[in-house]
Amino acid sequence: MFSGSIPALATPFKDGEFDEAAYRRFIDWQIDNGTNGLVPCGTTGESATLDNDEHHKVIAVCAEQTAGRVPVIAGAGSNDTQTALWHCKEAQIAGADALLLVAPYYNRPSQEGLLAHFSYLAERIDLPIVLYNVPGRTVTDIKAETVVELHRRFPDKIVALKDASGDLSRVVTHRMGAPGLCQLSGDDPLVLAGYALGQVGCISVTANVAPKLCADFHTAAASGDFETARALNEKLYPLHAAMFADASPAPAKYALSKLFDWFSPDVRLPIAPCSDAAKAAVDEAMAGAGIE
């Protein structure tokens, strides 16, 4: 269903506003360089600081510019179930192919609350759902048994998982309990190991900056050419780290501004611009990966 290199797209800003022209150019560049899918309005897209109108517009522009060339998995989650449902419906109207639904953050629901939240959404929307587990950001962990139960209840609706828990043992647990579930990594440094266990791709930060290298890495890993995959992974590894040398997506946007004069490094508060130390880390990692 979904596989390979899928960047969680950075959202370009200009003078504080969404830069639609830059976003369209960015999408074309991504697809031209082998990207297998696109995620607008994910964490890297600064969804937390987009207002609702911007959120829906970013998804609509992404779907329109992509024009069916690759799947568009729209970030549509919220810590309010009704707001999430609204985002889901707007994403479907906009032409998204699937929905990325993060665990509700801040209010820390129980596993029963998570089951009820995702079940409520699955019963009311038509698009396939990719669950997004990132407890380091949400302080809410979608436990493996909850993922398995959600897929059991809605096998044709809750079809995939982006896991950024850092616990690779869950890949096996998910495979055993929900063999039809498409498993994607949410941690660039762990993707190579994830392939060996049963993941089939990554919703990535690094792919914003190095789409061709990331696409080549995923092609090698998926085909079982681990010698090539290891070599590419080691080339990309410092870049994975550099993308978090400061609060994300500031390092990714700084890197993109180095590559393109039309992509601004601007971020929205409370994210601050890249520090000099983070810029140096990004510069070194890009040079090491041959991205200049």
Image: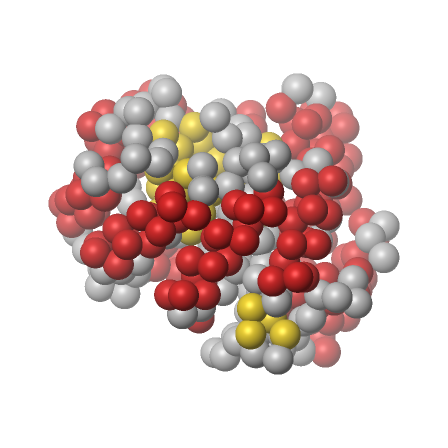
Q: Could you tell me which residue is drawn at 72 percent across and 61 percent down? A: 256
Residue 94 placed where, x, y %?
Answer: 43, 48
Scheme by which the image is coloured: secondary structure
**On the rendered structure, is 235 left or right of 126?**
right
Q: In this view, does 117 lie above or below 1?
A: below
* 5 shown above or below 109: above
Q: Position of residue 249 (x, y in %)?
A: 58, 64
**Image quadrant for the C terminus?**
bottom right
Q: Which of 209 and 108 is in front in this view?
A: 209
Left-right relation of 70 to 263: left
In the displayed structure, would residue 121 be above or below residue 84?
Answer: above
Residue 175 in view here: yes
- In the picture provided, is 59 more to the left or to the right than 238? left
| Location of residue 155 by image quarter | top left
Q: Which of 244 and 260 is in front in this view?
A: 260
Observer-nearest of 33 and 25: 25
Query: What x and y, as percent, mark residue 37?
Result: 57, 38
**Left of 79 or right of it: where is 165?**
right
Q: Which residue is drawn at 36% across and 34% down?
A: 128
Question: Which residue lies at the image location 59% right of the left edge and 59% below the top edge?
Answer: 10
Q: Residue at x 50, y 30 (%)?
A: 2
Q: Where is residue 129 in the image (x, y as percent from the top left)?
A: 35, 37
